[in-house]
Amino acid sequence: MSAFVVTPTYNEIDCLPGLVARLCEHLPDVRILVVDDGSPDGTGDLAEELGCDLLRREGKQGLASAYVDGMTRALELGADRVVQMDADLSHDPADVPRLLAVDADVVLGSRYAPGGGTSGWPLHREVLSRLGSIYARAWLGLPYKDLTGGFKAWKAPMLREVLSTPLVSEGYAFQVEMTLRAVRAGAKVEEVPIVFTERAAGVSKMSGKIAIEAALLVPRLRFARRSTPRSAGGA
């Protein structure tokens, strides 16, 4: 199995060495693909020094396009499985083998499945996150407890199918849209409990404005044209 971890970065020079070291500890054969949006702190150069595959982009172009570009590159490089995760160690690298061990087209690292949780978050952020998933479930009719999380493992055929048409979302609603597209394409989706830990270094990219933009996009996703053809996702 050829497994890739795709992680977007912008000014993550303090976190990247720890991420790479811990991923290699738990998955010695993993390939780490860093999608760097021109970090002025030198994150891209450090990624190359650490032996990562690097996709350089000019300036901040957004989370959704970073993941799409990174996932597309991983598929081009022959990935059988693609894991998407944050670079700031909010997602525990030790959980990556747990996600890859599940035989499903999409595996969601779930903060809100039994056994999951968050660490270091203030109450208002916990409430906002939980309500966001409840809101998305209600609009989209999906049963999964964590629709807004960004820690997922994909089988290559399903990921290729989901990315075969342009996305509607540009920000954090991208996480919801990707799972919705997979379900509409007939994917087997499983949730694995994880604990999300607030970053210890750097600055979070999440803001109230981003959350509102994501909320406004969710109803559009419900009525978006189902352009991804339905198929057996585990091929």
Image: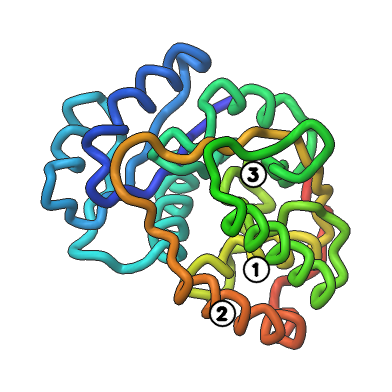
Residue 83 vertical position relative to residue 214 in the rendered view, above or below: above
Which of the 4 image quarters holds residue 112? top right
User: Which residue occupies 46% across, 17% down?
Assistant: 29
Residue 234 in the image, given as x and y percentages of width and height: 78, 45
Closer to the chain start, of discs 1 and 2, is 2
Is disc 1 in contact with disc 2, using a CB cutoff of under 8 Å? yes
Q: Which residue is mark 2?
A: 168
Circle 2 SS class:
loop
Which of the 4 image quarters holds residue 18? top left
User: Which residue occupies 38% across, 58% down?
Assistant: 205
Residue 217 in the image, given as x and y percentages of width and height: 61, 81
Which of the 4 image quarters holds residue 136? bottom right
Q: Which mark is residue 154?
A: 3
Where's the C terminus, which quadrant? top right
Q: Is residue 94 left or right of residue 20?
A: right
Circle 3 SS class:
strand
Give the class, few, some or many, for how many residues have Cα within 10 Å of label 2's Cα (few <14, many ≥20).
some
- Residue at far front of view: 123
Q: Amino acid at mark 2?
A: Val
Residue 107 in the image, given as x and y percentages of width and height: 72, 42
Q: Which residue is mark 1?
A: 177
Give the class, few, some or many, for how many residues have Cα within 10 Å of label 1's Cα (few <14, many ≥20).
many
